[in-house]
Amino acid sequence: MKNKLKKVVQESLAQTFVKKPLPDPHLSDSGPSTSDPKVLSPGQTGKGVPPADGKETPELISPLIQAVKVSENGSNVKVVEDESGINDPDKQQSFRRWWLKYKPTFGCLGETHVLEPNARRIIASILRGWRMEPNYEYSHIGKLWVVWDPAISLIVYNKSLQQITCGVEIPGISTSFTTTFTYASNIKAERRDLWKELQVIATNRYLVGSPWLVTGDFNQTLTASDHSLREEFDGLSAGSREFQHCLNVTGLFDLPYTGPVFTWWNHRRATPIAEKLDRILGNDQWLLSFPEAHASFEAPLFSDHAACCIRIPDSATTPKRPFKFNLHLLQHPDFLSIVEEAWRGFEVEGSPMKQVSRKLKLLKRILKELDHSAYSNIQKRTAETLAQLQQSQNAMLSDPSRGGRESSFGP
């Protein structure tokens, strides 16, 4: 069934994408490459490149590390990005320690600058036992590697110079999802090809309705506030407008996150510049399927890019107590006015679905506070009233004349 679905999605994307040659700006004239999306045959996709034994580790230059992690109890998924360059033994060891600490289950390495014959030895050195699916069809320096633990099910649907899209199933998480890893070109004209590819994926009839996670280095700010020198900008750049248009068409938006605003800086202490170039995006279906998923940007460690993590609760974990709406709140004289005032006061950005979902979450706190202030300890007060009733009835039965005068309680 999975192979059949994989083939159907691949053929669908192949028919929709417009193939267009595109040179890799990072390659010399002797290493041509194209950006037309590659749809693999069933024999190629999903199997990956098996790791080989060996200790030799070729150079790695400026890799983008993206990984999705399930914690030991299966309750978290993390995505981490790094563009550090691990071409020396010290950085290779640092990367290995990071990997062992977070224990990710799948991810993507980008801009590896590793020649294809050396790829297996790299995987054997830093990701022992893992599988990989690179895009050497478009870049002889391995611009993108999708890597994963064999414990999960990963199927590559489509790839090009700037993205690899795959379907993912993780044990312990009931809902499968689609993930697109990106490493956008630093040339605006070439990034347009990526924007078009994302729009095609978003409208594919076999993927519409699927939770979709898009993460990577987009090499483009979205708003002026994504730049540390934002006060020097008069308005949006053409590149930002094109990026915004792409997100509006695809229905993608930033997942809620904590941490620093910027994800990259130029390492120049005299003239420091920081930008938000890395993002973790999701669609409405992702938000509905994983409402508790949360992204965070953390210290960049050995990189000039911040590490970004995303956590998804495991279906097998004990669920939180669901919110219960008590009908007696409807009897409160100020119920409607309190709800209306709170709803209008919530400042939420994003698509209409995201705004409604977020406002409903925020409204829970308002309703809980109202319930507590107006109807707190209602069970205790009910029990006390019942005890008074019983006492009065007993008094009535013991001395009807006296009990009737001293109590207003009756049957």
Image (tube, rainbow, N blue to C red):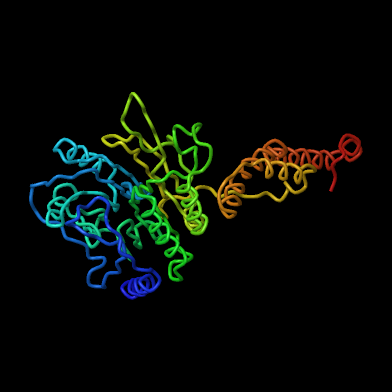
Q: Front-most of 295 and 262?
A: 262
Q: Is residue 186 above or below residue 94?
A: below
How many numbered marks have been drawn onto this rendered protein structure? 0
Task: Judge by depth and name the residue closer to the eye, 233 or 50.
Answer: 233
Q: Can residue 371 be seen in this view?
A: yes
Is 355 placed left or right of 184 in the picture?
Answer: right
Horizontal relation, residue 403 to residue 136: left or right: right
Q: Residue furthest top?
A: 270
Q: Which of 285 and 118 is in front in this view?
A: 118
View extreme (front): residue:
29
What residue do we see at 32% from left, 44% from top?
Answer: 81
Q: Can residue 133 be seen in this view?
A: no
In the image shown, does 40 or 291 lie closer to the viewer? 40
Instruction: Answer with the quarter of the image where residue 142 lies.
Output: bottom left
The image quadrant that residue 197 belongs to is bottom left
In the picture, measured across the screen, residue 333 lies left or right of residue 349, that is right
**Residue positioned 65% across, 50% down in the render:** 325
Image-quadrant location for residue 177: bottom left
Q: Where is residue 204 in the image (x, y as percent from the top left)?
A: 44, 68
Residue 410: x and y in percent read 85, 45
Horizontal and vertical percent position of residue 38 = 29, 66
Image height of 388 relative to 207, above or below: above
Where residue 166 sits: x, y (%)? 34, 62
Q: Which quadrant holds the N terminus?
A: bottom left
Determine whether 154 is above or below 264 in the image: below
